[in-house]
Image (cartoon, rainbow, N blue to C red):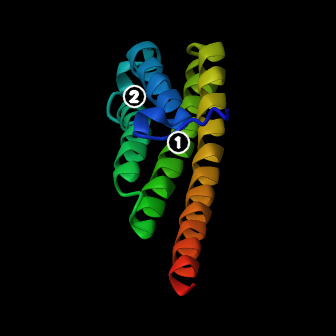
Amino acid sequence: MENKNYIRSFYDLDVYRNTYKASIEVLTRIVIKLPKQEQFDLVNQLRRSAKAVPRLIAEGYSKRHQKKGFQSLLEDAMQESNETIVSLSHVKDIYRIEIDLCNELIDIYDKSSRQLYKLSIAWSNFKFQRLTKTINETDT
């Protein structure tokens, strides 16, 4: 018997789980080590973008039946993920904080950006196939 991984919730999406865990690492291990002069710039930006990625995935999942809404939120999540990559690159290259951890997190966010793109394409194709199948069934 075939073992299928059903997606019943945004919790079932690997990209959500990975970005949520990464955001916790950013908030608890990176942000707290940044200098005070970055409090209103890099700290706020990194906090906001790291938290935004899993939030947008969760919100997008709730709108998965609205193609435009879902696509828009996945694009926003990709943008925030890429923004987090740039901020983490600044942290490691300018302040030399947790370089190995920053590199791991950058890899996670980079992979997540690609997963989000593939998810948006796959979901669009899936919905189109389902719609086409439903239309063809009603024609016969």
The residue carrying mark 1 is: 81
Q: CA distance from mark 1 to mark 2?
A: 20 Å
Q: Nearer the viewer, residue 139 or 90?
A: 139
Left or right of residue 135: residue 106? right
Count of numbered tags: 2
| Foreground tag (1 vs 2) | 1
Along the polypeptide, which appears first: circle 1 or circle 2?
2
Q: Residue at x 37, y 25 (%)?
A: 37
x and y, in percent, of residue 78 in the image: 53, 49
Locate residue 72: give its quadrant.
Answer: bottom left
Q: Residue at x 58, y 37 (%)?
A: 85
Residue 111: which numbered mark, if any?
A: none
x and y, in percent, of residue 124 in the image: 56, 64
From this viewpoint, which residue is outermost toward the bottom? 139
Left or right of residue 130: residue 26? left
Amino acid type at circle 1 is: Ser
Q: Residue at x 42, y 56 (%)?
A: 73
Which quadrant would the C terminus be assigned to in this image? bottom right
Q: Secondary structure at mark 1?
A: helix
Q: Secondary structure at mark 2?
A: helix
Amino acid type at circle 2 is: Glu
The residue carrying mark 2 is: 38
